[in-house]
Image: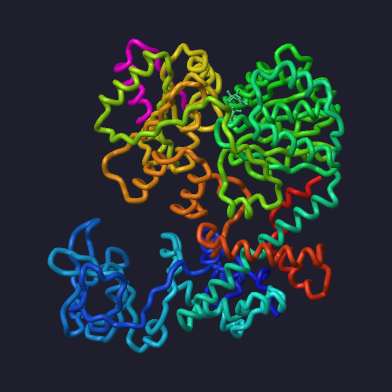
């Protein structure tokens, strides 16, 4: 039997080197298996023929049977187009081509009977179909009469004649070559228990559905398969880590921790913070390596938990480090930690990209000798030159900005595996957490420090700027500070900076009696710092910025967050931004400014923001509205949950089921060494061997 995963797509007839390259680049298809697992994103029922006379503005995709009466080329330059008049005897509809005009004209013959498929649009007093699919009536058996799959294709693919239809043809060629038979990946007893259809039947029907029912079963089977192997992998990794990976045992709670706790802690910890510290202490004292995700909404006090954990490491004669995603944040963490520690005898160093060479040359040996207890920094921490004498705990803040590889590097630089604490303010819905972090233990700070008033969120249209300025002036007079944030969208950066800079000029004029400062990603680190410092020190009342302040900055006196073009932000991002205020005792406000014209989804997003402050609710809504593929943080997370068919927002139940079954199998056979599990093991290896297994890096 052909090893589908290893057989290059170039072995398929119809795929030359050029097409192979485009398939690889555009659709990540390089093997037979990749092609078979390139699933249609929709199906259209082509069992019915419409009449031209029936077409109205509510008809979606339709197919017609009839003849072309004539061709005509009209327009010039970009509006040049080919128009074919098409009829089935009940009326006339126009078929239109803007591209491939010559090809379309040559290929289709006037008077011959065709099947035309496409979406009619109203045009003046009649309808037309732009770029229709056209097939000779003789091929009706192939194209019409059932559910027709549609595959995602890009412009580049289409240009290389790899449109949806062509992909379907490739699937046909391949399945034919395989004699429509595939080897099974799921053990027989699981198939029996779950009553799922075979892999062969599923793959055949996903590309060539025999009926709506069979298609549904095929989707179910393939979703299960996808989630099942992910869960099997995660659960096995977790079990392995728990059993085999020895961790440093932090047995003592010593001077550093106790002194700080008793003498330096400026306030009582919240119950949630206390619980989380207990969880972390138990974990680090257990003798196995800690791999813990700390979730806590913005402002819930994660930094303090991080500091207490680092003090535990120090009490056990180890060093600790904390890595932040930006310099501003690293600086702020450093300042916070220094402030908290006061006169305690703990040596803390700051290491970022802008640490001067002279300073670095002093720091690196001190880190290597163990003289320094805590290192706080950015990516600079994972450079090879940074060597610890005994790193016992690595903390990664706001993890969604880091790829998994970077995290792995943090503890690769040590002879022993340090404990790892990953902190995030991005609330992760349960289904997603199970998929992304199923091998991490999770702690949640589900409580904000006392005395905080809930942030009041308002939605205002951008033609009401005067009222907005009035409101801001009132707040500033009360001694508060204001953030004004502009979106930064990939691809339109030039325009975005222009918006910010223009806004800056306006604000400077409107608020001429106050100081306005500005921060954005294009500034040099030093410049950014100076501007930021103006705001932190209170010298400036208004800080205008792109999203660089999204993560972690803490200025308790800032009580108003204005978000310009709020419609261009995702929900989680809006929530993160909002979390920058509401840190002091004052009433805080978040003002979402948008244009008047909003899509339904966007209006919904803004409504959700106005209605709730709860990060988890927002994350769930985000997942529902956008699907997991777009959920912020998952794509950059490097965890590669590139799901091909399952949808975490909709398939939570299948996920849970797949997880339960995977757990049952591992309970009986942790190493998958039974003969009946051999195939399972092979499949698992094939699926995940390319990815780095960071739970096991030593
Ligand atoms: P985040 O979880 O977003 O990182 P921070 O650690 O920055 O939150 O904490 C937000 C603010 O709350 C800081 O000013 C911090 O000093 C303060 N804080 C943390 N814990 C408490 C507490 N138990 N009581 C009062 N204030 C606290
Ligand atoms: Mg923080």
Q: Is residue 443 left or right of residue 599?
A: right
Q: Nearer the viewer, residue 66 or 17?
A: 66
Q: Does 408 sit above or below residue 623?
A: above
Q: Residue at the spot x=30%, y=16% of the render? A: 509
Q: Residue 440 at x, y = what percent?
A: 70, 47
Residue 498 visible in the displayed image? yes
- Using residue 208 as the reference point, say whether residue 244 is left or right of it: right
- Up-down: is 31 above or below 606? below
- The residue at 31%/75% (across/down) is 117
The x and y percentages for residue 72 are 18, 71
Which quadrant does the N terminus fall into? bottom right
Q: Quadrant of residue 506?
A: top left
Q: How is the image coloured?
A: rainbow
Ligand 1 visible in quadrant = top right
Along the viewing direction, whichever of 135 and 400 lies nearer the viewer:
400
- In the displayed image of the protein, which residue is found farthest to the left? 125
Image quadrant holding the C terminus, namely top right
Q: How many marks?
A: 0
Residues rendered magenta in the picture: 499-520
Rendered position, 224 above or below 398: below
Residue 95 image offset from top left, x and y in percent: 24, 72
């Amino acid at each position: 039997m052909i090893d589908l995963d290893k057989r290059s797509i170039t072995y398929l007839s119809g795929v030359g080197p050029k097409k192979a390259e485009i398939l690889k680049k555009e659709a990540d298809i390089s093997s037979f298996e990749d092609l078979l697992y390139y699933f249609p994103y929709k199906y259209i029922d082509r069992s019915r023929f419409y009449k031209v006379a029936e077409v109205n503005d509510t008809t979606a995709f339709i197919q017609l049977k009839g003849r072309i009466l004539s061709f005509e080329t009209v327009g010039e330059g970009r509006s040049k187009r080919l128009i074919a008049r098409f009829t089935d005897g009940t009326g006339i509809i126009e078929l239109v081509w803007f591209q491939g005009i010559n090809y379309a004209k040559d290929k289709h013959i006037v008077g011959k009977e065709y099947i035309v498929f496409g979406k009619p649009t109203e045009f003046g007093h009649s309808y037309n179909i732009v770029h229709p699919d056209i097939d000779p009536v003789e091929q009706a058996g192939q194209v019409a009469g059932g559910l027709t799959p549609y595959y995602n294709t890009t412009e580049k693919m289409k240009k290389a004649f790899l449109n949806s239809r062509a992909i379907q043809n490739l699937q046909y060629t391949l399945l034919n070559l395989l004699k429509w038979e595939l080897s099974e990946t799921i053990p027989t007893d699981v198939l029996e228990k779950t009553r799922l259809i075979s892999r062969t039947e599923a793959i055949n029907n996903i590309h060539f559905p025999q009926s709506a029912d069979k298609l549904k079963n095929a989707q179910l089977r393939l979703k299960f398969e996808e989630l099942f192997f992910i869960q099997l992998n995660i659960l096995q990794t977790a079990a392995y880590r728990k059993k085999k990976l020895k961790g440093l045992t932090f047995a003592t709670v010593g001077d550093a921790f106790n002194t700080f706790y008793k003498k330096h802690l400026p306030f009582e910890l919240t119950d949630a913070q206390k619980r989380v510290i207990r969880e972390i202490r138990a974990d680090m004292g257990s003798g196995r390596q800690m791999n813990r995700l700390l979730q806590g909404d913005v402002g819930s006090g994660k930094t303090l938990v991080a500091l207490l954990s680092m003090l535990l490491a120090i009490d056990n004669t180890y060093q600790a480090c904390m890595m932040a995603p930006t310099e501003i944040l690293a600086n702020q963490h450093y300042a916070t930690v220094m402030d908290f520690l006061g006169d305690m005898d703990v040596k803390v160093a700051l290491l970022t990209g802008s640490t001067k060479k002279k300073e670095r040359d002093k720091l690196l040996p001190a880190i290597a000798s163990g003289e320094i207890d805590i290192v706080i920094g950015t990516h600079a921490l994972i450079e090879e030159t940074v060597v610890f004498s005994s790193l016992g705990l690595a903390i990664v803040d706001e993890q969604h900005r880091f790829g998994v590889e970077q995290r792995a590097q943090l503890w690769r630089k040590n002879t022993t595996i340090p404990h790892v604490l990953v902190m995030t303010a991005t609330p992760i819905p349960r289904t997603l957490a199970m998929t992304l972090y199923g091998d991490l233990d999770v702690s949640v700070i589900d409580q904000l420090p006392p005395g905080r008033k809930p942030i009041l969120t308002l939605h205002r249209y951008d033609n009401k700027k005067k009222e907005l300025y009035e409101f801001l002036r009132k707040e500033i007079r009360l001694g508060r500070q204001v953030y004004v944030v502009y979106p930064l969208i990939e691809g339109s950066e030039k325009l975005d900076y222009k918006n910010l800079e223009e806004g800056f000029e306006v604000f400077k004029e409107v608020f001429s009696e106050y100081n306005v400062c500005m921060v954005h990603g294009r500034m040099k680190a030093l410049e950014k710092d100076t501007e930021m410092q103006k705001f932190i020190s209170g010298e400036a009342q208004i800080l205008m910025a792109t999203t660089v302040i999204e993560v972690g900055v803490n200025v308790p006196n800032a009580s108003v967050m204005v978000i310009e073009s709020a419609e261009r932000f995702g929900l989680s991002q809006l929530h993160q931004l909002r979390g920058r205020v509401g840190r002091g005792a004052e009433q805080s406000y978040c003002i979402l400014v948008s244009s008047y014209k909003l899509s339904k989804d966007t209006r919904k997003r803004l409504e959700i923001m106005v209605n709730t402050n709860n990060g988890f609710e927002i994350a769930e809504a985000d997942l529902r509205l956008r699907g997991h593929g777009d959920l912020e943080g998952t794509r950059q997370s490097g965890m590669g949950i590139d799901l091909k068919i399952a949808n975490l927002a909709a398939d939570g139940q299948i996920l849970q089921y797949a997880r339960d079954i995977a757990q049952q199998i591992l309970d009986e056979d942790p190493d998958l060494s039974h003969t009946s599990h051999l195939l399972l093991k092979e499949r698992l290896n094939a699926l995940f061997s390319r990815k780095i297994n960071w739970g096991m890096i030593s």
